[in-house]
Image (tube, rainbow, N blue to C red):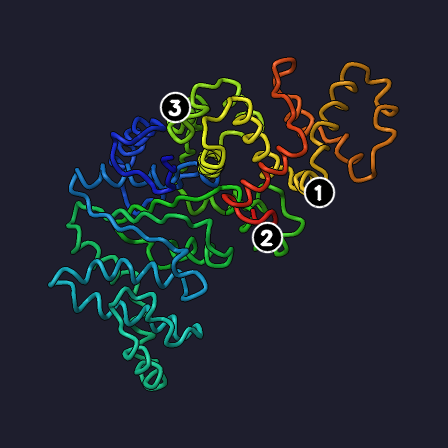
Amino acid sequence: MRPLTDNPISRPEDDAFHFEPYVTVLHEAVAEARPLPLTVGVFGSWGAGKSSFLKLWEKRFTKDDVRTIWFNPWKYDRKVEVWAALLHTILAELEQEEKLKDKALRLAKAATWLSVRAGLGAAAALGTGGVIKGEAVDQMLQDISVRDSEQYRQINSFESDFASAVREFVGPEGRLVVFVDDLDRCTPESAMTVLESLKLFLAETQCVFVLALDLDVLAAVATNKFGDALKGAPPEVVSGMAYLDKIVQLPFFLPDVGFDTLRAAYATAVPDLADSDFFWGLLQTSLGGNPRRLKRYLNVLSMALSVSRAQHSRALTADFSLRLAILLIIRTRHRAFFHLLAAEPETWRILTSYFDRAQAEPRNAESYRAGFSARLREFTEHPELENLLTYGGHHRVTPPDGPEVRAMISTLRNTAGPDSAD
């Protein structure tokens, strides 16, 4: 088997989702942006390929000799103030220039002082990218009462000094592109501080900030933060979307990846079923088109098929492979029914038979389930489960008998972990 990894791509030749044309459009638009700074929002749901899109775009800037920095805020979440980590990440890059070392160090001390005053203490060193060492932070704590007035003066000029340092780093007509990935993986509070720091500290810089995030998640966070304070205001004012509009000047929504594209990209993970239209139609209907969810599902299924093949010491039939695929969907999307199958494996056949008869004669549905237990009854009114078990109509997969269900559940436990795991 060849598992599908979740690593973002960075080479155009690996662009199975065909993002490159969109990267070109966005790249050309940003190249014309004046004056800076500019904040670009690359919006997409969880697992939609935002990191890959950003990596492809970063490659384009590198070809144009534009300086770039990559920042993953979730690495610092709950460890340091994330906004301070962002500042220090940029300053650590500036410090590599000999002529900017002293200026970067002064700015890093000012940013660390802000963290210390916020109650962060020695943990601030975690976010400084090596610009400020742990012992230096400790010393700052000891000296802070003496040096407060000096630090206040530095903070007052921090924004302009920071902009000046960036200008020296990139040149009068240059720009620094800062990619902020996985912002929506942070705690809501940390995500908000990063957004606010772009306005508070970096509003004069020659920077392009590229934020990859799930718009719905961040809009909900903003709405929760400001909703109580704005009770009675018009909905468009209270909306978290309105707040994000003030942060992001250029929104870009990641294009949907067609399911046929996903099939072509992922077919190698399941050679047993790569050519089965039935199988891919089943996945599209039951799991949708989220790339990351499909990757995880296909990796587990491929491993389970390999284990089954080794257990039987022979090739697997197409029907068996499809039954195992359906059982994994049940385990993934219908956990309660999966637990019932583990206890009463014949219920797959019983429930499928009920759905067949109820579809043919809906008026008699109640009589067909008259002898069902209360636990089984609840699944007779579950349309998603009905669609799964009867998928394909007359060409559907024959339900397995009890012993085969038990054997397949055992295989899934070996490959996907305990039944209680996600």
Q: Residues within 10 Å of mark 3 (few under 14, many from 20)?
A: few
Vertical comparison of 194 with 298: above or below: below
- Between 218 and 53, the residue placed more toward the observer is 53
Element at label 2? helix
**Residue 296 shows which numbered tag?**
none
Asked whether disc 3 touches disc 2, contact meaning CB atoms under 8 Å apart, the reply is no
Side of 365 relative to 44 (left or right): right
Farthest left residue in view: 98
Q: Residue at x 69, y 36 (%)?
A: 345
- Between 327 and 50, the residue placed more toward the observer is 327
**Residue 343 shows which numbered tag?**
1
Return the disc, 1 or 2, that comes first in the chain's sequence.
2
**Type of amino acid under label 2:** Asn
**Residue 224 shows which numbered tag?**
2
**Type of amino acid under label 1:** Ala
Side of 329 relative to 192 (left or right): right
Vertical comparison of 189 with 3: above or below: below
Q: Residue at x 43, y 38 (%)?
A: 43
Return the disc, 3 or 2, that comes first in the chain's sequence.
2
